[in-house]
Image (spheres, rainbow, N blue to C red):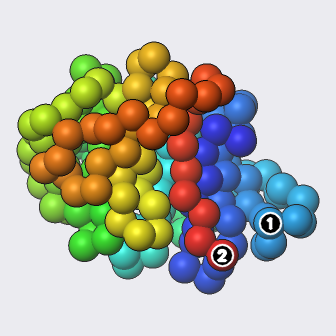
Amino acid sequence: MIGVSNLKDGTILGVGTNNQLYTRATISSSWVNVPDSGNIVSVTILKDGTILGVSTDTRLYTRATLRSPWILIHHSGAVLSVTVLKDGTILGAHTNQHLYTRATVTSHWVHIANGYPVIGVTVLNDGTILGVGPDNHLYTRAVLQNPWMLAHHGASVIAVASYTN
């Protein structure tokens, strides 16, 4: 899996290395392919349960349920990774490797200053923002306005996700 999120009912939603969506009921159950799930590189769940995905074309799409069609979000920019902050704000890592926020799926992106370049982003359960730099190291920031801090010199990382059990 290159990404993972949690549906409102607790189902684990994953993005496979083939850019297809998969679900599993528990952390130890088998992955099940979601039919017609598109070509997705990043996925998150909005506060209302809507699925928000980044496609291989770097644009945002939504779908109301796992079985409904993807709906293109016009003027969604070029995004590598997307997540949702605790307050419901959408946080995206843009193809220019800067962070941007948008209040809703249809509002405009707002650039976040104080940025080290990132290619992937997620929010941990405690609200800490975790990013993957283009150097494949992990970085954290407690809040959006803080600078990135190197989290650990370790293995090379290409993506991050947060799982809620």
- Name the disc covering residue 97, or none: none
The kind of residue on which mark 2 rests is: Asn
Q: Position of residue 45 (x, y in %)?
A: 46, 65
In the displayed structure, 145 sits above or below 128; it is: above
- Which residue is painted at 30% across and 43% down in the image? 92
- In the picture, measured across the screen, residue 162 lies left or right of residue 127, that is right
Disc 1 to disc 2, C-alpha distance:
8 Å
- Which residue is painted at 23% across and 63% down in the image? 89
In the displayed structure, 62 sits above or below 78; it is: below
Quadrant of the rendering where the N terminus is positioned: top right
Tag count = 2
Q: Position of residue 88 (x, y in %)?
A: 27, 70
SS category of the residue bearing label 1: loop
- In the picture, measured across the screen, residue 94 lies left or right of residue 113, that is right
Do the residues under discs 1 and 2 have CB atoms within 8 angstroms? yes
The kind of residue on which mark 1 rests is: Ile
* Closest to the observer, 124 or 20: 124
In the displayed structure, 116 sits above or below 124; it is: above
- In the picture, measured across the screen, residue 89 lies left or right of residue 20, that is left
- Give the residue pinned by disc 1: 27
Q: Earlier in the sequence, mark 1 or mark 2?
A: 1
- Give the residue pinned by disc 2: 165
- Which residue is painted at 9% across and 44% down in the image? 110
Within 10 Å of the Cα at label 2, are there few (<14), some (14-19), or many (20+) other Cα atoms?
A: few
Q: Is residue 58 visible?
A: no
Q: Residue furthest top?
A: 135
Q: Is residue 142 visible?
A: yes
